[in-house]
Image (cartoon, grey):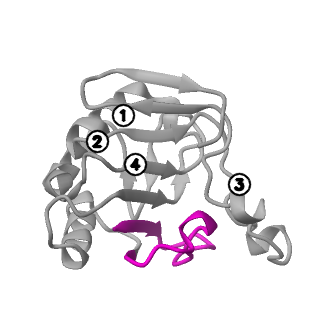
Amino acid sequence: MIVYIHSHEIEDRGVTMGRHAAARDIAHIIVPDGTSVDGIVDLVNAQVADANSIWTLIFNGHGDEGRTGAIYFGNWIDSSNVGEFSPLNRLMNRAGRGVELHCCRAASSETMLVNMARAFGVRITASMDDQLGRAGRHWGPITLPIGGDSYGVIEGQTVVAFPNGRVAYSSAAV
């Protein structure tokens, strides 16, 4: 199963990425403003019941411009509260792709990524750079998803953090 967690104000909330077009088991969760991490856990648990069933969990939202690695989903999520996702650990399939953070500069903090990997029990993939996602209305009319079938890749320098604390860097989009 592929689960998308969308921040409420993201233009492409509820949209399936092109690379998942053929997938049959997809859930989209839109996180209301003001939702805590515990609230996000409750939203996921309401959609997914079976252990080891999430192959890929995608966070589609905003990152902190201050390069702290924090991401915004109703409230700021950072290294101080990311451990609260640990109840979702049982839902993650260890053979899957893990968690992807489609949020600008989410890989700015290794501590945040490693803490998140430990909470979920799977690898976390994020970028040091801005994520283009889908062109927002305030930049003009939506005529894309950017890159067509490549919409949904993590752009720029990627960082992968593992539950054992190992961190790997790559310049290739994933």
Q: Residue at x 29, y 22 (%)?
A: 165
Give the Cα separation between the discs numbered 4 and 1: 18 Å
Residue for badge 4: 97
Q: Quadrant of residue 83?
A: top left
Answer above or below: position of 116 versus 141: above
Residue for badge 3: 132
Decide: marks 4, 3 in contact (CB < 8 A)?
A: no
Give the Cα separation between the discs numbered 1 and 2: 14 Å
**Mark 4 or 1, nearer chain start:** 4
The secondary element bearing badge 4 is classed as loop
Residue for badge 1: 112
Q: Residue at x 66, y 34 (%)?
A: 172
**Mark 1 or 2, nearer chain start:** 1
Nearer to the camera, 43 or 169: 169
**Residue 69 percent across, percent down from the top left:** 47, 37
Give the Cα separation between the discs numbered 2 and 4: 8 Å
Please provide the residue range marked out in magenta: 1-27
- Disc 2 marks which amino acid? Val
